[in-house]
């Protein structure tokens, strides 16, 4: 369906409010217009580009929520979090994160994003990784954006352990998965 | 047994030649003298302190040996390596590697040391981590020195995989262990 410019801009505003992390490419495809048209729409509507929207969300909302570590110790930008349930972060792979020789991201940076998200999701003053089982499924290159999703899967109150599954994707393809067994000082209230 | 100063200095020189990584404390205990005496002995014999000895060994000997990555991309200092067999590295935990709140070393730094050693030990132009199963056994604090030992345990020529076990210790206590499944471009010549 083709919309008038006015209709499209109205729907565009609504779409971005609902999902601030939608890309210009996805919006263009949704509204059957060019990416350039979307950019012009955004400018007219004073909607910042995706990267700026992410930074705003990351900086504003989660500072006070994360308990287990100061937010500047999280590797990547947290863009959504519900303590002891789930968390989401974005990490832009730069030249400093890759092997010089083949420009493939070094494993410990992908691990750092996932591991610090597994720490951040814990609703406790102290959370430490006890065990982790991780798979590097596809090489990630400089310039790519990695989205990590952490989901709390279970709690062992007696042993004060929380189990977290982290899945990292680039453009919808899974590049890394990890199971994290987290030690915490207090048991979880949940589950 | 108590030695004369001359005997002790002779044996001291020999001991350090045999094991450049022995500490002043270990030497003091071995020769039943104070650490201060060992320091004076070393000064008289112009033997640099342990840290300097390690840096010398690390910088001089392994640049040309490691094939899978440039040596400056290894996290920690490699102090011994035999490709496709074993490798040893030292990593000094600094303030930049710990959580501000409790000064416990962050997991991804211990992982980085172990993982880059598992890459370095591979006798191949390309080695990538496919899977890793890791345990954080004891908290490591700022100021501590972590010694990682990587041992190649088996090869799967058909799948071009090499399996490496890494054990990291602080003062002889195991703080981290990891099993690494490494992908390589060529199969190993060994085993």
Image (tube, coloured by chain):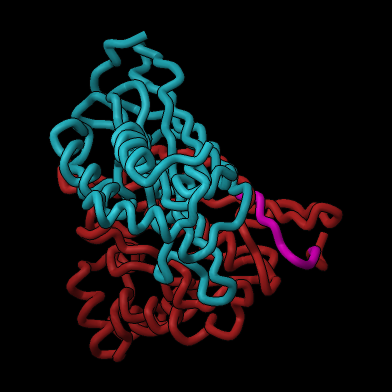
Chain colours: A red, B cyan
Lateral position of residue A1 relative to residue B68, left or right: right
Q: Is residue B19 above or below residue A140?
A: above
Residue at 29 percent of width and 25 percent of height: B82
Residue at 18 percent of width and 37 percent of height: B61
Residue B157 lies, in percent from the top left, at 35, 12
Residue B148 lies, in percent from the top left, at 43, 41
Residue at 47 percent of width and 69 percent of height: A74
Secondary structure that dominates the magenta span = strand
Does residue A137 appear in this view? yes
Q: Is residue A79 above or below residue B93?
A: below
Q: Is residue B8 magenta?
A: no
Between residues A42 and A165, which one lies in front from this camera angle? A165
Residue A139 lies, in percent from the top left, at 31, 41
Q: Is residue A183 magenta?
A: yes
Magenta residues (range): A180-187
Lateral position of residue B111 relative to residue A25, left or right: right
> Quadrant of the image for the C terminus of chain B?
top left
Lateral position of residue B168 relative to residue A122, left or right: left
Q: Is residue B104 above or below residue B15?
A: below
> In this view, which residue lies farthest toward the top?
B191
Between residues B15 and B126, which one lies in front from this camera angle? B15
Between residues B88 and A115, which one lies in front from this camera angle? B88
Between residues A80 and B181, which one lies in front from this camera angle? B181
């Amino acid at each position: 369906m083709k919309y008038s410019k006015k209709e499209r801009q109205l729907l565009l505003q609504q779409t971005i409010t609902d999902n601030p992390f939608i890309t210009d490419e996805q919006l263009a495809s949704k509204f059957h217009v060019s990416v350039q048209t979307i950019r012009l729409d955004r400018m007219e509507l004073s909607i910042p580009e995706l990267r700026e929207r992410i930074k705003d969300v990351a900086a504003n909302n989660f500072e006070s929520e994360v308990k287990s570590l100061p937010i500047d110790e999280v590797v990547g930008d947290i863009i959504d979090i519900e303590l002891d349930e789930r968390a989401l972060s974005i990490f832009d792979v730069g030249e400093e994160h890759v092997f010089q020789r083949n420009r493939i991201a070094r494993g410990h940076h992908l691990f750092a994003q996932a591991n610090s998200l597994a720490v951040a999701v814990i609703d406790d003053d102290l959370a430490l990784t006890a065990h982790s089982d991780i798979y590097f499924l596809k090489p990630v290159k400089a310039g790519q954006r990695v989205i990590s999703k952490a989901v709390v899967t279970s709690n062992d109150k007696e042993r004060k352990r929380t189990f977290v599954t982290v899945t990292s994707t680039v453009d919808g393809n899974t590049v890394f998965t990890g199971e994290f067994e987290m030690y915490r000082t207090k048991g979880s209230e949940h589950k």
